[in-house]
Image (cartoon, rainbow, N blue to C red):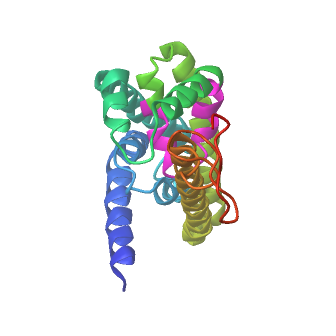
């Protein structure tokens, strides 16, 4: 058994115990913690909640409602973390990073100001980012009713899909984790490629900017006084002879 399998097994045992003891609220608590600690995978907890409901140990509707409530609790906690951190502090830290410009941050802010609601909603469907998308919402002080609406909508859809899959698959609920695991790896690969492309383009841009600042070389056809140099070894004669 690999280390990863061992950790997932421990998480499964913990979540199972929590749900069997507390029912729907236990599933909600597990998902709230998943939002705050992404290493706890929702793709394990949610299908497991559906499987537990299928065994009659928890109401299916209750599982969906409580896990969505748990998603909201975790998201709001991260929202306030972003708000407390504050924009100015994040900007001061970000501009110290290599290859990051203030204009990058300003463009990101402008984009989030325009598309923040959609980012929060669709971000709930992307592993890893589904938790952290709440932080920029807090940094930008998105209106709380709007934040809650988009977070609840995205979380309700995501949670319902995986809980229902676990309910239908029964003892084979772990198949869901395998497919979502592949999806997560695909997301990570896309992000890594995007980072590499950004770094390469930014380095090229910085080199080009340095070249433009330095200007053309001193060689060519002018002497130190700005006059033309002799060409082909000939002697230049001044007009003021």
Quarter of the image with the N terminus is bottom left
| 71 or 24: nearer the viewer | 71
Magenta span has 129?
yes
In the rendered image, residue 67, in percent from the top left (x then y), is placed at 48, 40
Q: Where is residue 56 in the image (x, y as percent from the top left)?
A: 51, 54
How many numbered dots are placed on residues in this image?
0
Does 7 sit above or below residue 131?
below
Q: Is residue 42 left or right of residue 91?
A: right
Residue 77 visible: no
Tell me if 84 is positioned left or right of 167 in this view. Answer: left
Residue 69: image location, x then y, percent? 46, 32
- Which secondary structure is most common in the magenta stretch? helix
For the point 48% across and 53% down, the residue is 42
**Image-quadrant location for residue 170:** bottom right
Describe residue 165's horizontal placement relative to residue 142 as left or right.
Answer: right
Residues shaded magenta: 115-135
Within the magenta stretch, is there residue 31?
A: no
**What quarter of the picture does the C terminus occupy?**
top right
Q: Is residue 153 above or below residue 226?
A: above
Q: Is residue 127 above or below residue 5?
A: above
Q: Nearer the viewer, residue 106 or 234?
A: 234
Can residue 115 be seen? yes
As drawn, which residue projects farthest toward the front?
241
Which residue lies most toward the bottom here? 1
Question: What residue lies at 40% left-to-right and 45% top-to-bottom?
Answer: 23
| Left or right of 179, for residue 41 | left
């Amino acid at each position: 058994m690999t280390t990863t399998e061992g950790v997932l097994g421990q998480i499964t045992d913990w979540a199972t115990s929590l749900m069997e003891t507390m029912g729907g609220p236990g599933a909600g608590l597990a998902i709230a913690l998943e939002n705050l600690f992404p290493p706890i995978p929702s793709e394990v907890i949610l299908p497991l909640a559906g499987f537990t409901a299928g065994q009659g140990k928890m109401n299916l509707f209750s599982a969906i409602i409580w896990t969505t409530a748990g998603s909201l609790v975790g998201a709001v906690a991260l929202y306030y973390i972003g708000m407390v951190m504050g924009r100015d502090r994040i900007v001061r830290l970000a501009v110290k990073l290599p290859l990051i410009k203030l204009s990058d941050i300003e463009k990101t802010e402008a984009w989030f100001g325009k598309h923040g609601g959609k980012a929060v909603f669709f971000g709930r469907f992307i592993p890893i980012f589904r938790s952290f998308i709440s932080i920029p919402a807090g940094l930008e002080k998105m209106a709380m009713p709007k934040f809650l609406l988009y977070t609840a909508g995205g979380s309700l859809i995501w949670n319902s899909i995986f809980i229902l899959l676990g309910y239908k698959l029964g003892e084979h609920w772990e198949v869901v984790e395998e497919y979502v695991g592949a999806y997560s790896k695909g997301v990570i690969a896309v992000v890594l490629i995007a980072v590499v492309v950004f770094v390469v383009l930014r380095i090229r841009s910085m080199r080009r900017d340095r070249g433009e600042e330095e200007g053309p070389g001193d060689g060519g056809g002018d002497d130190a006084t700005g006059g033309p140099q002799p060409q082909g070894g000939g002697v230049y004669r001044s007009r003021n002879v």
